[in-house]
């Protein structure tokens, strides 16, 4: 679970207190989030980016996709 922005910092802190095998990260910039996504995404993965239009999450996807696309074999998609 990747969380973004100042409003999600509290949730990140709470989730860290809970015993779980789930990976949780918090990111303060689009670039940080996109880089983390690009490192984790693999062929066949599905991704849900959730945020308001004001958060401009499409720019996160565009940044991450540029990194991921260069690593995928031709004809492969997420």
Image (cartoon, grey):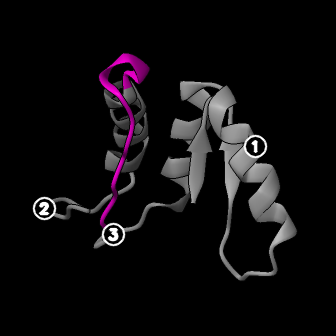
Q: Are marks 3 and 1 in contact (CB under 8 Å)?
A: no
Judged from the image, the secondary structure of the residue bearing numbered disc 1 is: helix
Q: Could you tell me what secondary structure mostly forms the magenta stretch?
A: loop
Judged from the image, the secondary structure of the residue bearing numbered disc 2 is: loop
Q: Quadrant of residue 63 in the image?
A: top left
Of discs 1 and 2, which sits in the foreground?
A: 1
Point out residue 4 in the picture as x, y percentages from the top left corner: 59, 37
Measured Cα–Cα span from mark 1 to mark 2: 40 Å
- The first of marks 3 and 2 along the sequence is 3
Nearer the observer, 45 or 18: 18
Give residue 10's mark.
1
The residue depicted at 34 percent of the width and 58 percent of the height is 47
Measured Cα–Cα span from mark 3 to mark 2: 15 Å
The residue depicted at 40 percent of the width and 67 percent of the height is 42
Indicate left or right for 23 with 30 as reference.
right
Crowd class of label 1 (few under 14; some 14 to 19; many from 20; radius 10 Å):
few
Nearer the observer, 38 or 12: 12
- Residue 27 in the magenta stretch? The answer is no
Residue named by callout 3: 45
Point out residue 25 in the picture as x, y percentages from the top left corner: 69, 52
Question: Which region shows up in magenta?
Answer: 46-56
Q: Quadrant of residue 62 in the image?
A: top left
The vertical placement of 71 against 30, above or below, is below
- The first of marks 3 and 1 along the sequence is 1
Nearer the observer, 77 or 8: 8
The vertical placement of 73 against 64, above or below, is below
Residue named by callout 2: 75
The residue depicted at 82 percent of the width and 63 percent of the height is 16
Q: Quadrant of residue 73 in the image?
A: bottom left
């Amino acid at each position: 679970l990747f969380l973004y922005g100042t409003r999600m910092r509290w949730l990140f802190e709470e989730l860290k207190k809970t015993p779980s095998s789930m990976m949780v990260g918090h990111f303060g910039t689009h670039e940080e989030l996109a880089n983390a996504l690009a490192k984790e995404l693999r062929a066949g993965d599905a991704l849900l980016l959730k945020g308001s239009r004001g958060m401009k999450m499409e720019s996160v996807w565009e940044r991450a996709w540029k990194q991921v696309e260069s690593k995928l074999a031709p004809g492969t998609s997420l």
